[in-house]
Image (cartoon, rainbow, N blue to C red):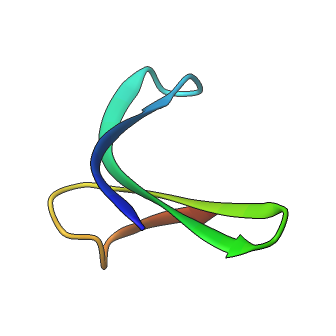
Amino acid sequence: MCEGGQVYDPRNGKTYSGTITMAGKDRLELRGYIMVSLIGRTST
């Protein structure tokens, strides 16, 4: 897992904290959140 990055959402123009994790051999999961990772959104 890589932590401490930032994620830009072009739909609303905002930047969030983020993490990226290998979810499989050819899949990544990107999680963007505000302050606490429990409140956020994950994309694969």
In x, y percent, where is residue 32?
42, 54
In x, y percent, where is residue 33?
33, 57
x 68%, y 60%: residue: 28
x 36%, y 52%: residue: 18
Q: Nearer the viewer, residue 24 or 15?
A: 24
Residue at the front extreme of this rendering: 25
Q: Quadrant of residue 8?
A: top left
Residue 38 shows in the view: yes
Quadrant for the C terminus in the image: bottom right
x 44%, y 20%: residue: 13
Residue at the right extreme of this rendering: 26
x 50%, y 63%: residue: 41
Residue 44 shows in the view: no
Q: Is residue 34 above or below residue 16?
A: below
In x, y percent, where is residue 42?
57, 65
Describe residue 17's horizontal placement relative to residue 27 as left or right.
left
Total labels drawn: 0
Describe residue 25's horizontal placement relative to residue 22 as left or right.
right
Describe residue 4's horizontal placement relative to residue 43 as left or right.
left
Q: Is residue 5 above or below residue 28?
A: above
In x, y percent, where is residue 25?
82, 71
Q: Quadrant of residue 14?
A: top left
Quadrant for the N terminus in the image: bottom left
Describe residue 30's horizontal placement relative to residue 38 as left or right.
right
